[in-house]
Image (tube, helix red, strand yellow):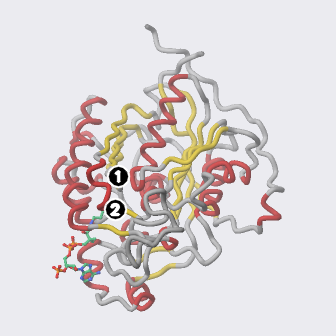
Amino acid sequence: MRTHETAVVLGAGSCLPPHVVDNDAVIARGALLTDAGWIRARTGIERRRHASPGTSTGDLAVGAGRAALASAGRARPDLVLLATSTPDHPCPATAPEVAHRLGLGTVGAFDVSAVCSGFLYALAVAAGLVRSGACAAPLVIAAETYTAIVDPADRTTAPIFGDGAGAVLLRPGGRDEPGAVLATDLGSDGSGRAAITIPGGGARHPRHLPPPGPDAHFFHMEGRAVYAHAVRRMTWSSEAVLRRAGWAPDSVRAFIGHQANQRILDSVGDRLGIAPAHRYGNIRELGNTAAASVPLVLADPAVHRAVVPGERTLLTAFGGGYTWASAALTWPDVTPLAEEPDTAPASARTAAPAVPAVPVPASVPPPPL
Ligand code: UT7
């Protein structure tokens, strides 16, 4: 099997549900004992998107995947990884149906479950598979529909989370190309399992037994504990990946952290010593979209207007598990595209035209031993 120098981002796409919900609307929806000013001051969030009833994570994933493929010039993926903590069903994984709906035939497809770190876990796995020669064009999607699992009446979670999806397509390439994934860092600490959880409905508390609590099928988060861990772990993981890349923090020109809370992002950026001018995000407009938050910033046209292809880029995320992950890459030379959620009826979905088998760009020779 032929190995490659690294994986390079060839296309980027996004998909957002059109329904915008501002802080006043989220408060009215759940009759929350809070106010828009509290939400804005404590989180940095002013509005978020909510999927309409009937729109699923798979629908958003198909939209983002299709946009990334169009951005990449309709190259044909040979693997689909879908990072999500809100799959369409507990079983099977959502990725195979997404691949089918994208017209990708019988390519490998699987879900990655690492909550808010999921996109960076999937990116690290996909980049490793490209380097090893096991695949040449993985499509990495992160899609979430937190409105499906958040209790609208829970003021500690309902104002924070939003729905959306982002995706990138990778190809083999050289380490000196814009978009090259140069280093990754993954970590976990299962002692934090209970701090971000849906307590019921899994093998620990099956649905046929009495639930462990009255709202056991909703998403729960111990915000204060998670906050402290998120700051520390994203900082340390970023430092680890910067060491691996051989980059000084102040040489980073695009810092994208998981859009959990603006105060968390400010703390991590300050601790790392990355100037505010080089930090990018969308939390004010989209809230916390869990695994989708980092790729949604990566696929934001406004960020592409501000960052020059090839500039040093640091991605970092923290989420349930606990899990955390970071990646050092150079800013990709792509034109990101956006698509609407694909909510075609199931009968129409199987009719998706097959993506023509356009080969991915020529791969680079393996590095010298
Ligand atoms: O995406 C995965 C990773 N997630 C994160 O990293 C999220 C991490 N956590 C956070 O972003 C923040 O902890 C929250 C935004 C969830 C909460 O902000 P906070 O400043 O950490 O507040 P807190 O949890 O320390 O709570 C302070 C007070 C509490 O009242 P008491 O116990 O002091 O009386 C809360 O009950 O604020 C109360 N509170 C609220 N008050 C008004 C919590 N939520 C609200 C609210 N409106 N929406």
Residue 43, placed above or below residue 324: below
Secondary structure under the numbered disc 1 in the rendered image: loop
* Position in image of residue 14 (x %, y %): 55, 58
Judged left or right of residue 55, residue 157 is left
Image quadrant for the N terminus? top right
Image quadrant for the C terminus? top left
| Three-letter residue code for mark 2 | Ile
Residue 322, placed above or below residue 106: below
Q: CA distance from mark 1 to mark 2?
A: 7 Å
Determine the image quadrant of residue 176: top left
| Three-letter residue code for mark 1 | Gly
Name the foreground residue: 196 vs 301.
196
Sort mark 2 into few (<14), some (14-19) or many (20+) by Cα contacts within 10 Å: some
Name the foreground residue: 53 vs 17.
53
Judged left or right of residue 306, residue 126 is right
Sort mark 1 into few (<14), some (14-19) or many (20+) by Cα contacts within 10 Å: many
Q: Quick check: is the Cβ at mark 2 less than 8 Å away from ligand 1?
A: yes
Q: How many marks?
A: 2
Quick check: which quadrant has ligand 1?
Answer: bottom left
Residue at the location (27% across, 85% down)?
A: 37
Residue of label 1: 321
Q: Are marks 1 and 2 in contact (CB under 8 Å)?
A: yes
Identify the mark at residue 311; answer none if there is no mark.
none
The residue at the far top in this view is 369
Judged left or right of residue 230, residue 208 is right
Residue at the location (30% across, 90% down)?
A: 33
Residue at the location (39% across, 70% down)?
A: 212
Judged left or right of residue 314, residue 19 is right
Residue 206, placed above or below residue 275: below
Secondary structure under the numbered disc 2 in the rendered image: strand
Residue of label 2: 196
